[in-house]
Image (cartoon, rainbow, N blue to C red):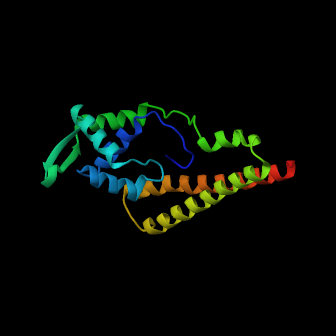
Amino acid sequence: MSMLECQDDGMSLRHAVLGMLTSGPASGYDLLKRFEGSIANVWSATQSQIYGELARMADEALVEVVAEGPRGRKEYAITDQGREELQHWMTEVDPEPPRRSAMLLRVFFLNLLPPDQGVAYLRRQADLAAHQHAALTKIADEVRDEVGDEAFYGRIALEWGLRASTLIQEWADWAETEIRKAT
């Protein structure tokens, strides 16, 4: 789940896989590694989720098996139909606004805890955001000199993560101060 714990329409995994396949054929394992090395800060997926989605997309002719290797390893490529689906999703389907945040749901009910436990919860959120920011900063340093469209737009998405982590940390600090003033 993303930093803000937002839910999406459930189709984004499909489109993330299709987008990843535009840079070339890949196995499910290869896609998992691509996710981890590029878009994990905006969309994460497990190996089983990726394999399941690849199978569904193959049934719908959005991807095709282009090579098979040892131990049942399959390499998939995006089809023309898959490219059309990705284009449609990117240009004609608006993302649903975030509707769920387990972090904010807990904040809503902090009045049920003693103030020191509420403050401790907010401190953890600030610390988690700081940790996330440090991890994203490290990634930004590692990809700074990469070239190409994927790297360019990846850095734009990475900047969102950096700014969001800063926002959460600043908000949690502010909220902690508010609780301390109220008690």
Side (left or right) of 70 relative to 117: left
Q: To which quarter of the image does residue 93 belong?
A: top left
Q: Position of residue 50 (x, y in %)?
A: 32, 45
Look at 48% across and 53% down and name the residue there: 41
Along the viewing direction, whichever of 58 and 110 lies nearer the viewer: 110
Along the viewing direction, whichever of 108 and 25 lies nearer the viewer: 108
Q: Position of residue 57 (x, y in %)?
A: 26, 36
Side (left or right) of 137 relative to 177: left
Total count of labels: 0
Q: To which quarter of the image does residue 33 belong?
A: bottom left
- Looking at the image, is 126 positioned above or below residue 61? below
Look at 53% across and 56% down and name the residue there: 159
Side (left or right) of 65 relative to 124: left
Q: Position of residue 96 (x, y in %)?
A: 51, 33
Look at 42% across and 31% down and name the residue there: 92
Look at 25% across and 34% down and name the residue there: 81
- Looking at the image, is 142 positioned above or below residue 153? below
Along the viewing direction, whichever of 170 and 101 lies nearer the viewer: 101
Q: Position of residue 11 (x, y in %)?
A: 40, 35
